Image: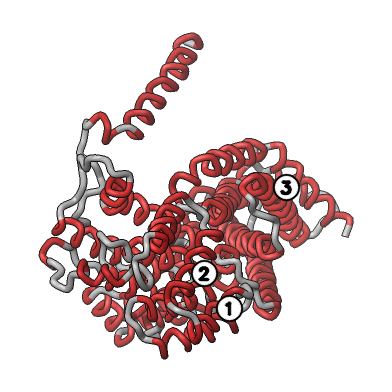
Amino acid sequence: MKTGMFAVRWAVVPVVLAVLLVTLDREATGWWPPRYTLERQVQASPAMLSMLSFGLRPLVADYLWIDAVQYFGHTLGRHVHDLVDGRIVERGLTGADVRVASRVFHLLIKRLLAVDPLFVRPPMLGAMFLMDPHADPALGMDILQTGARKNPGSWQLRLWNGFYSYALLRDKETARRELMAATACPGCPSYVADVRLLLETAPDTVLARVFWSRAYGEARTEEERVYLQQRLDELDEGIGGFGLEHRHEHEHHDHDEAHVAPVR
Amino acid sequence: MNALRAIAVHCFTDILRSRILYSIVAYAAVVMLVAVLAGEWTLGEEVRLVTDLGLGAMLLFGLLLVLTRGAETISREVERKTVRVMLARPIERWHFVVGSYLGMAMVLLLLVAALLAVLVVALLPMGGSPSWTLAVASWGVFLELLMVAAVALLASNLSSPVLATLLTLLVVFAGHLATGLRAWMDGGADIEHLSPAERELAAAYQAGPLNVGLRLGYYVLPIVAHVNFKTEVANALPVPVMRLILGTAYALVYSGIMVLVATAVFRRRDVS
């Protein structure tokens, strides 16, 4: 009897390991469809999620962030990176798909912000990724503005909001106000004051180079560095202004709502 | 006083003799595993994820301990009739109740401190530094567990171990929901994020008799939001000293009242 139980116990280990490996590799094996499709169904509202979080609201926000990152990685990120590397896009998205994916990614970040408005990096990185030429800068701007509004004490969000307000929307008044507010936030580094001065006096290219270089220095991940290096390369190649203007051509205001599940 | 200390120490060692160390090892394994994988998942937010997960697991393991051991403190002694041996000695009944609670409190303090140490060790290689806020958040977890232990002690006095566990779980869950429900009733900040169906539900709460019941419940349930500092630690924000003091006072007073009620119930209980 004892030997039987012993064997059963040890038989469980390889079974669990096999299930784990298959689960991790499910997309590669194609045993069941990938979870991260373009269209997403979001069931619970942020308010409901927060209430049912058992006091672990930040952990729920972490889960939503991981979810958003994975979604990005399987849609927009894959598309953008394949183009950056100059390789043939095997699973790249079409223009319409990019619009849908941008919209879904934007909604995922907005939902996260409703759960934890103080989480700084999702709106910052979400905006950065959506500002990519192949994504949707208008939605990126919206995320940034929402983040800065919900978390006015974050110098990072104020700085990025101010910078993009000027670089993308040419709204110098908002940029001035946001950069001023950023310098008053706790923990704000001294270079933000320099950026504020450059906004008034320096040409766009100088301002852009200072901003992108500083942001590159503060980047924590490879994805951020790839994006920021692109901006710096564009400056080196002599693309005028902030290297953002050409993105207006890619802005899409005709989002196909039918493809996107309603997110509250 | 000696009797109280003796019972507390007895309860403390009795719980330690159970498999509490296993839970610490399991906790360490979970936190370390996440620490290894987190970098891939979070795009630079691994310290935050491990901190949040660590605090969440701390709460979970503490709750498991309270639900498995705390909810059977009194009822088990009564069922096994070992309480009669104790009460035959020159000790008061309240010594037994309060001593059991203090013993459980000591174990919880030890557990939280040990898990905090594991969490700090897991964070160090990732560049996370031990912060005052992390200690405060852990203190909040301890206070929450103290309140739950007090509820479990009372429940243990009123019913069998299984029912006491269920009752405690229900009360704790309701305590977590209470803050959100109150925000719904009062039309709080989250109301803008409600779906139309949830808004209708909120309107029903506001208008109906549920409102009165829930409002009463709000003052009876352990409102754990008062001692929840996890949002602050997750976003590297300072915890206001006054909030910490008031939260601590609330948890101690609430626990004290629950223990008092448990003592009163046990005084009238027939243990023969």
Q: Quadrant of residue B131?
A: bottom right
> Which one is nearer the viewer's eye here, B18 or A148?
A148
Identify the mark nearer the N-term, 1 or 2.
Answer: 1
Q: Residue furthest bottom?
A: A173
User: Does residue A201 appear left or right of residue B133 in this picture?
Assistant: left
Which label number is shown at residue B25? none
Q: Residue at x 27, y 48 (%)?
A: A83
User: Three-letter amino acid code at disc 3?
Assistant: Arg
Task: Give the residue number, with chain letter if any, for mark 3.
Answer: B84
Q: Residue furthest front?
A: A238
User: Three-letter amino acid code at disc 2?
Assistant: Val
Q: Residues within 10 Å of mark 1 (few under 14, many from 20)?
A: some
Q: Are marks 2 and 3 on the same chain?
A: no
> Which one is nearer the viewer's eye here, A169 or B75?
A169
Chain letter of the residue beneath label 1 in the structure image: A
Task: Give the residue number, with chain letter if any, for mark 2.
Answer: A210
Task: Give the residue number, with chain letter if any, for mark 1.
Answer: A194
Q: Position of residue B49 (x, y in %)?
A: 52, 53
